[in-house]
C-alpha cells in the first residue's frame, strides 16, 4: 500500500469540541479563561510582528465576542511597543463575554480608543488584524460585518486573521457570505476542519497553529476529524 506523500503535521478536531474544551485547556495549563485569552492574543501579536516587522500602523477589527477579545489583546500589546493602532469595534447592546470585556477594559486602561466601525480608515494603515468573527459562526455575516470584510479585502494592507478568517465556517470550510481573504491565520488549540477543507481552501493564507502543548493530553472521547468524513467537505 502506497503512502500518501502529503500529510498534515497536526491532527484536526471538530470546532465545537475545541470551543467546549477551552475551559479544560485553561485548567490543564493552570490558567483562567481570561489568561488563556491573553496567551492567544500574545501569540497573534507575535505572528503579526514576525510576519510584518515593518508595519507601523495596525488596524484591528474587533467583533462582539471572544474573538474580538483576542483583538483587544493584540491592540494593547502593539500599542505598548509604540505601534500606532486604530481599533474599530462592532459593538452591540448585548454584554460582552466576561473575558472579552476584561480585554476591552485593559485596552481602554492602556489609553486605547475604540472607534465606530463606520469611520474612514486612516491612509497610513499597513496591517489589518481580523478579530471580527470566530469559530461559532454558523451563517453568513450580517450586512454591517460584511461591509467591513469587503473593505478589508479591498485594502492593500496584508491581513492577519485571529483563529479563523471572519466569515469562514470552522466546521465545513463553507463561505455562505462575505469572508476575509487572509494572508496569515493564527489558530489556537487545534486545527479546525474549515481551515483545510471547502472550495475556498486558500482563504486562511499561511496557517499557524498555537496549542501550548495541551492537545497531546486530550482524552479519546474527543471526536478527531476523520479522513473518511473529510470527503464530505471537500468540494474541489
Image (cartoon, grey):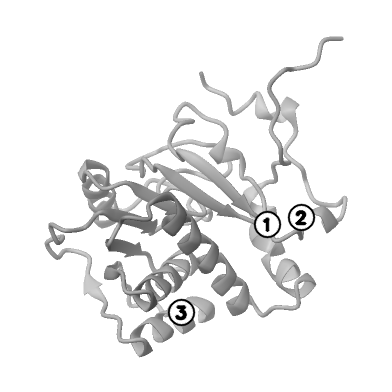
- Where 127 falls versus 64 (above or below)? above
Question: Residue drawn at (52%, 56%), measured in percent from left and top?
Answer: 136
Circle number at residue 211: 1
> Closest to the observer: 23 or 9?
9
The residue where tag 3 is placed is: 103
Could you tell me how far apart the alpha carbons at marks 3 and 1 are, in whole angstroms? 21 Å
**Mark 2, other Cα within 10 Å: few <14 / some 14–19 / many ≥20:** some
Residues under numbered marks 1 and 2 in contact, where contact means CB atoms less than 8 Å apart = yes
In the rendered view, does 198 fall on the left or right side of 178?
A: right
Secondary structure beneath disc 3?
A: helix
Query: Residue placed at 45% from the left, 43% from the top?
Result: 168
Q: CA distance from mark 2 to mark 3?
A: 25 Å
- Residue closest to the eye, 139 or 12: 12
* Residue at disc 1, secondary structure: loop
**With 149 as the anchor, is 103 left or right in this view?**
right
Looking at the image, tell me whether mark 2 or mark 3 is earlier in sequence order. Answer: 3
Instruction: Give the label, 3 or 1, closer to the camera.
Output: 1
Sequence-first tag of 3 and 1: 3
Amino acid at each position: 500500500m502506497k503512502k500518501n506523500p502529503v500529510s498534515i503535521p497536526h491532527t484536526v478536531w471538530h470546532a465545537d469540541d475545541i470551543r467546549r474544551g477551552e475551559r479544560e485547556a485553561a485548567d490543564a495549563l493552570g490558567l483562567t479563561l481570561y489568561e488563556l485569552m491573553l496567551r492567544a492574543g500574545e501569540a497573534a501579536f507575535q505572528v503579526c510582528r514576525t510576519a510584518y516587522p515593518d508595519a507601523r500602523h495596525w488596524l484591528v477589527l474587533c467583533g462582539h465576542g471572544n474573538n474580538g477579545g483576542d483583538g483587544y489583546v493584540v491592540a494593547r500589546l502593539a500599542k505598548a511597543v509604540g505601534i500606532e493602532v486604530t481599533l474599530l469595534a462592532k459593538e452591540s447592546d448585548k454584554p460582552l463575554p466576561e473575558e472579552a470585556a476584561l480585554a476591552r477594559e485593559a485596552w481602554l486602561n492602556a489609553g486605547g480608543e475604540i472607534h465606530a466601525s463606520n469611520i474612514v480608515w486612516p491612509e497610513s494603515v499597513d496591517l489589518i488584524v481580523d478579530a471580527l468573527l470566530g469559530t461559532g459562526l454558523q451563517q453568513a455575516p450580517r450586512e454591517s460585518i460584511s461591509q467591513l470584510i469587503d473593505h478589508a479585502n479591498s485594502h492593500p494592507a496584508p491581513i492577519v486573521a485571529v483563529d479563523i478568517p471572519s466569515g469562514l465556517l470552522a466546521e465545513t470550510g463553507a463561505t455562505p457570505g462575505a469572508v476575509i481573504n487572509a494572508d496569515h491565520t493564527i489558530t489556537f488549540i487545534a486545527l479546525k476542519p474549515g481551515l483545510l477543507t471547502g472550495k475556498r481552501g486558500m482563504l486562511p493564507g499561511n496557517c499557524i497553529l498555537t496549542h501550548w502543548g495541551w492537545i497531546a493530553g486530550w482524552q479519546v472521547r474527543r471526536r478527531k476529524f476523520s479522513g473518511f468524513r473529510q470527503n464530505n467537505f471537500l468540494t474541489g
